[in-house]
Image (cartoon, rainbow, N blue to C red):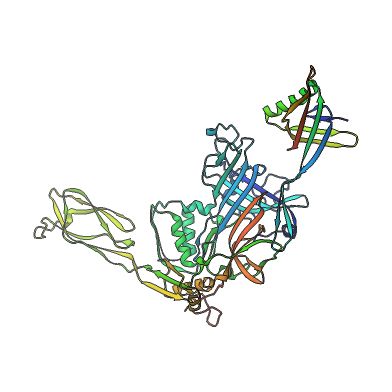
Amino acid sequence: MSFVLSGTTIKAPQSISETNNTQVSQIRTLGGNITRDYFGSNKRQWIMQYKTINSADFTTINTIYQTYLSTGTTVSWAISETNYTVSSTLVHIDLAQRSFSTLGTDYLSEFTLTLTEA
Amino acid sequence: MQTVLAAFTAEERDTDRKIVQSTQIAWKKSYKNTIVFFTIGVSTIGGTDLIPSTDGSPSQWNYYQYDDDSSYVTGLAYERELQEPTGGLSAGMAEAHFNNTSGRYTPRTFGGSSAIFTAVEKPGRPFVVNAGFNYAGIDNSIPQFVGLTDRPPKIDMRGRTTTIQGTDFVGFLQNQYVDNTAMFTGQRTDQIIASTLATLGFSTAQYDLDTGINIVPFAEITAGNKFGPFIHKLVQAENGNFYQDETGKLRFQNRQAWNNAPYNTVQRIISTGQVIQQSNPNYDHLINVVEVVSKPRAKQANQLVFSLSGTKEMPPGNTEMFIQFDDPMLSIDAPVYVANSLADGTGTVTTSSLLLKYQDKFARTTKLTFNNTSSATMFITAMTMYGRPAKVTADIYTRQQDDSSVTAYAEHPYKIDNEYIGSKDWANSYAQMILGDYSEPNKLQNITIRAIPELQFGDMISWQGRYWRIYGIKTKLDDSTGYVQELKLVQKTIVDYFRIGFSTIGGTDKIAP
């Protein structure tokens, strides 16, 4: 029952979306029919929204991201929730922006973690 | 057409196709001649023996150790086109685009440090492309291109992409220079090509040559020139084609090759459901007047080829003398000469004191080294030399036209000047064949189709109820275009003209006009 990125359990996001990403060329022939040429297999992408996250939970994710950037090596990703599972998959990580809507001493932050299947 | 399974054909016609490709490059050009090719009944499945190219003839290029670069490919393009209307030498080209985010294709000079960073900029790397479809969960690809990279890669560091380009082995041999002049007399085109390929180091397993129809009385390839133009001219005189097929085999096809199996049956029926674009070329290709010019040479009987005019001074010791001939010489005899102590020939005959020490023979020159063994200067007052020259034996000129086409479209002339066309009959039939194929504009067409990777040159296809021959294939494979081919099509009429020694009386061969 967890979200595991690069072997580390990370905090569950407030929302998550999974999208399919196919590489396809769609061609219309003179006969009128639409045909498709697919290149490679379907690749999934997970976009996870985090809100009011404390500094420690952000640091856990950010450390994995920084390691990914410095090594240039994809990391494993798995979800084992009761009704939503993703078997271990290698992913690229994007952690583009961190924003603070509530300041104060805790600096709770909001950010989006994007994982793209390699 | 390459042989493929029915399931492969079914997938290529499917509305949803899964495209696969395999791109391999021998970056380090490591050659392993201990590679053993798979033999049914001998090799074991799962063993180390390799599957050779599809026609079962292990070519030299199979022995290189290739890196599999398929997973880095973002796009492929390759093309080959016959030299219509006359035929000749045709080279294929290929281009591969790679994702370089990993830095694999970044050369040392750009700060690269990958496993191939020292090799990536070097030309002449063996380069193999296969493509096809994934069906039943398995990648099924067939040969599409074999060649060598021919220039440094195009590196886009900001875009993180690298593009490499290459030509097939025809492109390679086109640019090879001849070290020693060679002459051929009374040989067929295929015999001369075989000899030339052997000179270049090609083994017989690497080529397949049709028996030539044209017998070339005399051909000469001179040192310092390139092989490409020589082979091109020979094959053009034949009205045939010399090219490398998708599997890497060099092929010479004579002008009648497409009359025979498998070219005489329809290989694929193309439906509008497979065609993306259809276009007609402009009138530039229209030919309704053909002129053929040739000055063939042939070997002659032994004859006088040199006679000294004036005298030649011979001081004591060695003296070199160069004699140039107007024609290529198949053989040169030793000179017959008379020497005298005086230039006007009134002194003492000294021929016995003048020795011919060496005679070096070249194609159009001979170098004589005389040794005057006496202590006084003497003079050669007379000298003759016999030999077998290859002289121009005919001045062939023919001009033929298609009157109805000239009336309709004005004159569109085409001239062929080729000294390997040896007879007026041959020139006439040559001109007629070109007129037959190119005097009407509707005999050429280009179509862009969803790729049928097994198609090859000369394949007969049926399209809109007419039969067409493929003479050009331009393939693109990327995620924006899809897997498509632009086919250049011609409606070719192949006529067997009567030839003494080949055709039979009462047979179907026509008499040349």
- Specify the quadrant of the image occupied by residue B205: bottom right
Residue plotted at (40% across, 51% down): B179
Quadrant location of the C terminus of chain A in the rendered image: top right
Pick whichever, B377 or B124, lies toward us: B124
Q: Answer with left or right where residue A101 lies relative to residue B150.
A: right
Q: Answer with left or right where residue B97 lies relative to residue A116.
A: left
Residue plotted at (52% across, 58% down): B90
Q: Position of residue B478 (x, y in %)?
A: 65, 49
Pick whichever, B150 or A76, lies toward us: A76
For residue B248, say whether it is visible: no
Farthest top residue? A105
Q: Answer with left or right where residue A95 lies relative to residue B477.
A: right
Numbered-mark total: 0
- Specify the quadrant of the image occupied by residue B392: bottom left
Q: Position of residue B220 (x, y in %)?
A: 39, 60
Q: Position of residue B279 (x, y in %)?
A: 60, 64
For residue B257, say whether it is visible: yes
Farthest bottom residue? B506
Pick whichever, B374 or B52, lies toward us: B52
Farthest left residue? B346
Pick whichever, A29 or B214, lies toward us: A29
A8, above or below B23, in the image: above
Quadrant location of the N terminus of chain A in the rendered image: top right
A109, above or below B33, in the image: above
Q: Position of residue A55 (x, y in %)?
A: 78, 21
